Image (cartoon, helix red, strand yellow):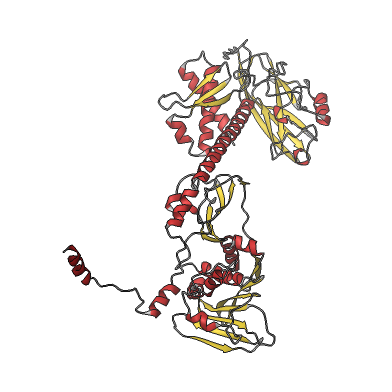
Amino acid sequence: MAGSTRKKKNKGVRAGKLRIADHWNAISIIANSQANPLKAVAEFVENSIDARAKQIVIVRGKKKGAFYLKISDDGEGIPRDEQGLPDFRRVATHICDSIKRQFKSRGAKGIQGEFGIGLLSFWTVGQNLSMTCCGADGKPYQMTMAKDSPDFAVLKKRILLPFKGTDMTIYPLLPGLRSLTGEKIQRYLASELRDRIKETAVTVKVIDRTGRSEFVVVPRQFTGRLLHNLKPAETEQGDIYLEIYLNDPASVNRVGLYRRGTRVLPSITELDHFEKEPWTAGYLQGIADVPYLSLTPGTRHGIIRDDRFDALCRAMVPVEKHLQKIIEEQRKAEEERSSRQVLRRVQRALKEAFLRLPQEEYDWFDIYGEKTQNKSGRLFSSGSIRGDSRQKIDRESENPEDVPELLDNDSSQKQFFEYAGPLFSVLISPKSSVVSVDKRKKYRVICRDRSRRIVLENLVYQWNIMDGEGHLDENHRESTTFIAPPEPCLTTLEVIVRQGDKACRDEAMITVTDSLMDQSSNTGKANKGLPGYTYRRAPGEMWRSRYDEEKNVVVINNGHRDFVYAGKQKGRKLRYICRLFCKELVRHNFSGLQTNELLERMIELSLYTEEHLK
């Protein structure tokens, strides 16, 4: 009874096969499915590579006021029919039935085409297509097609000499392709057909006659460090080839998806499954060539999410874990390198500030020299000046060790670019100072070239008191001693330094007072030099930084909301860390002052420091 019921139901079912109702409409849809004209040009070049060509020439020119594109090769040409003639008729009447598929089934290698629709993509490039090829008799034959037309024609063509290969001309180009320059074609092919060009050793030349330029398509070269031991999991469909480089993070770093040497996607992250780290981290560039993927035939720009794609996703899992580990190590190394750079820049800015600030108020952290111990009170260091420069300083300075620390050089012999250039700027150190009445204080001028290297040669000095009281005991040397008057006043000190016809000047302010209070809290203590810094993550706590006196480091809370905000930009992060340094240095040096006075000192130090924070 049940069986009879089933038979009755089946009698009402109608079955059939899909078919195309309007063949020309289907051809039109296929021909217009290629949205990228550069991709169409790449397919024409691939047809030449499939024909075993060794030389391919692409010419962009203009005739009768319209642009054209011509692609010539020296390959095997169009397959011939039984009479030995180029079988143009089969090419035009077997759309979606590529003869290359038959060649593959017979064991042919190095052939990419398989859909039989690549030639129709000329619709997205120009109005008319003409293809010329010689037959076995050496006579040339030409096939012509037109956009939006179902007709084609094959005719003999007269030429003086037979040639090998195929000539294809598209004329005129579509109006929107005026910007399709030879350089754009060259750049696109270098990435799109990178491995196909490398494997076949074909020479592809692009001649832009309108731009009067010529380019050779060189397969794209990646930058960075090539990563080894990237082993995808084995799949039944085939092997995956990976060529991935680790580079500095940038938005242009992408890993392209290829199939048998031809690019399918510019970035693997266009696939939802791979829109995650490590692929989105910006550290990687290179290619992932998966020969067994199923392409979307219409655009040839995308893949079908079938079992082959699923095999790719599973195979890349161990690779992703390995790459993520490498990127994490790279990030840690970058953070350490960035921290060293920030520390150097902050300390350099602080040292420049100390050259301008009263040294008797900022004589802490060994800034003015535990090494020198000569009471000169400057940012100087000995032991790095060599040769003639050292001898000159010995002759001209009262204290041979009175040399700017900026002269330090680790190498025993200077390179060419390390020698100072012409005089560019001068700086009096200290820039601002306080001197007791009837006391003496020494001042020095630091001369630099445009690159901030110290200039020592062929200099003439002239010291003057522009305003105020006091006098100088020597005014024609690199340094001078100011003798304060018996009454308090404000004195302006000037220096003019000449080198040939070049003259530079600077001023310093001297406050002469009848009482001088030592505001340093570190008098008598062992100095340690400028502190370093380290991070401690404490997101739930409100402190921004602390000074660890025992270790001589500034501990910065990198979990504080201000640090998170500042860390989004390198310049803002640098300024934030510099201000934390100023805060800790002022608190440590002026621990006995009241809050309002500490704030005044911090503003003073921040002002002079951030000016040189570069």
Q: Is residue 146 in view?
A: no
Quadrant in the picture for residue 169 = bottom right
Q: Residue 225: image x %, image y %?
A: 62, 45
In the depicted structure, whether residue 474 falls above or below residue 149: above
Between 28 and 102, the one lying in front of the other is: 102
Q: Residue at x 50, y 82 (%)?
A: 145
Q: Residue at x 57, y 30 (%)?
A: 609
Q: Residue 448: image x %, image y %?
A: 71, 35
Q: Residue 97: image x %, image y %?
A: 48, 75
Q: Is residue 355 in view?
A: yes
Between 201 and 579, the one lying in front of the other is: 201
Count of number-bearing discs: 0
Q: Residue at x 59, y 30 (%)?
A: 343
Between 539 and 509, the one lying in front of the other is: 539
In the depicted structure, whether residue 607 falls above or below residue 169: above
User: Residue most toward the front?
Assistant: 1
